[in-house]
């Protein structure tokens, strides 16, 4: 069975884009692949979160993952920093990663531009840590968005380089898992582009009813159609796309007809959209709340996930250490 691995940083909340997009597919994948899902808390340290908030960030994402349907009986769900082998592999991969190639990474260049005062080495080697995450489980497939494709390419380069440098075949080359048409692209509320956590255009699974209504009512539209069957502005098209994700087809059709005969009132469309989003997310929000506070359940989930992940990581590191040439000085005195 092929191994699939996916990581998410421990900052922020899951939004509708994550939920109706990748997560929907992860839930299905759990039945067909050997799945590893983890929270990349080490990666989050590049932005220096305060220690008082650090754990709650990890706990939040974990509760949101679980409430959305990731199943700890089917998948290994774990936290990156609980697996010391990842950091060990990261050190070794750093030795075969070159400054020039890391500096050329688009995400690094962006970060330098956005945050010139915090260009730390962890930021430069972010893709190396990500490669360690992937290679430690010898993952075959990694579902990634466009913004992470270059990082996955670096993981492939490092896998090949390690294998050829040490004459080993420890690492398979991880491929992008392309969901193709199974991946629903969820647009944002700001009139263009997709929903994302840095864009501030999103609705979070954790938003309450009031917040959801407020955000949707503020969504960008145009001034309305003045002629029958006029083309739709992207902002309005986006609201229809959102509606088609959360509402039934008759409702969508009713608003489409209203648009086409110019009787539509965007306020009504938005009210319907907000109500139907709530129908999906409010039950999840309740689950998030209860899981977040359920120490016993979270402990059980993480215990199992960590065991599975460490078992897989230890097996890889054994081969890696041997390939690199580490030999123990310890002898068995009974021999
Ligand atoms: N860098 C990814 C992101 O920002 C998160 C991540 C860390 C990841 N390690 C990973 C994703 C390994 C896939 C595989 O979204």
Image (spheres, helix red, strand yellow):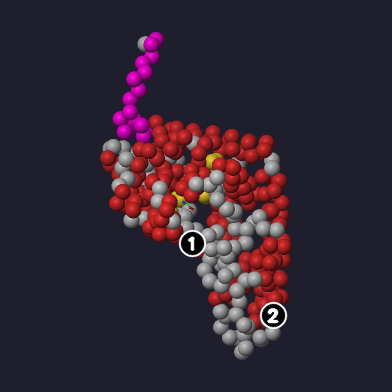
Q: Nearer the viewer, residue 135 or 92?
A: 92
Using the rendered view, name the quadrant where residue 276 is placed. bottom right
| Dot 2 crowding, Cα within 10 Å, few <14, some 14–19, many 20+ | few
Residue placed furthest toward the top: 334
Q: Residue at x 62, y 61 (%)?
A: 203
Label 1 vs 2, first from the N-terminus: 1
Residue extent of the magenta highlight: 319-334
SS of the residue under disc 1? helix
Q: Position of residue 312 (x, y in %)?
A: 47, 36
Q: Position of residue 248 (x, y in %)?
A: 68, 68
Q: Position of residue 291 (x, y in %)?
A: 68, 44
Which is in the foreground here, disc 1 or disc 2?
2
* Residue 310, disc: none
Q: Please say whether residue 325 is one of the residues in the magenta stretch.
A: yes
Q: Which residue is mark 1?
A: 180
Residue placed furthest toward the front: 117
| Dot 1 crowding, Cα within 10 Å, few <14, some 14–19, many 20+ | few
SS of the residue under disc 2? loop
Residue placed furthest toward the bottom: 227
Left or right of 133, for residue 166: left
Q: Which residue is mark 2?
A: 265
């Amino acid at each position: 069975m092929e191994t699939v691995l996916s990581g998410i940083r421990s900052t922020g909340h899951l939004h509708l884009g994550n939920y109706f997009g990748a997560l929907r597919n992860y839930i299905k994948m759990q039945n067909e692949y050997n799945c590893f899902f983890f929270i990349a808390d080490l990666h989050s340290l590049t932005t220096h979160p305060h220690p008082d908030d650090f754990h709650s960030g990890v706990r939040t994402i974990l509760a949101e993952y679980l409430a959305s349907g990731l199943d700890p009986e089917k998948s290994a769900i774990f936290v990156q920093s609980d697996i010391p082998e990842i950091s060990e592999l990261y050190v070794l991969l750093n030795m075969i990663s070159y400054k020039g190639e890391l500096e050329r990474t688009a995400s690094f260049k962006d970060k330098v531009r956005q945050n010139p005062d915090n260009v730390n080495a962890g930021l430069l080697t972010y893709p190396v840590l990500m490669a360690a995450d992937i290679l430690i489980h010898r993952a075959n497939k990694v579902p990634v968005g466009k913004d992470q494709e270059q990082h996955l390419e670096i993981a492939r380069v490092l896998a090949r380089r390690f294998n050829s440098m040490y004459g080993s075949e420890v690492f398979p080359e991880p491929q992008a898992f392309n969901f193709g048409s199974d991946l629903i692209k969820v647009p944002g509320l700001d009139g263009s582009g997709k929903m994302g956590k840095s864009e501030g255009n999103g609705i979070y699974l954790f938003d309450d009813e009031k917040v959801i209504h407020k955000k949707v009512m503020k969504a960008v539209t145009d001034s309305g159609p003045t002629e029958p069957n006029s083309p739709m502005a992207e902002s309005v098209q986006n609201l229809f796309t959102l509606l088609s994700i959360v509402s039934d087809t008759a409702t969508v059709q009713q608003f489409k007809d209203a648009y086409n005969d110019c009787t539509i009132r965007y306020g009504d469309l938005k009210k319907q959209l907000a109500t139907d989003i709530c129908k999906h997310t409010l039950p999840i929000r309740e689950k998030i709340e209860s899981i977040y506070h359920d120490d016993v359940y979270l402990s059980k989930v993480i215990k199992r996930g960590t065991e599975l992940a460490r078992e897989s990581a230890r097996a890889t590191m054994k081969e890696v250490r041997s390939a690199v040439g580490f030999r123990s000085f310890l002898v068995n005195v009974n021999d």
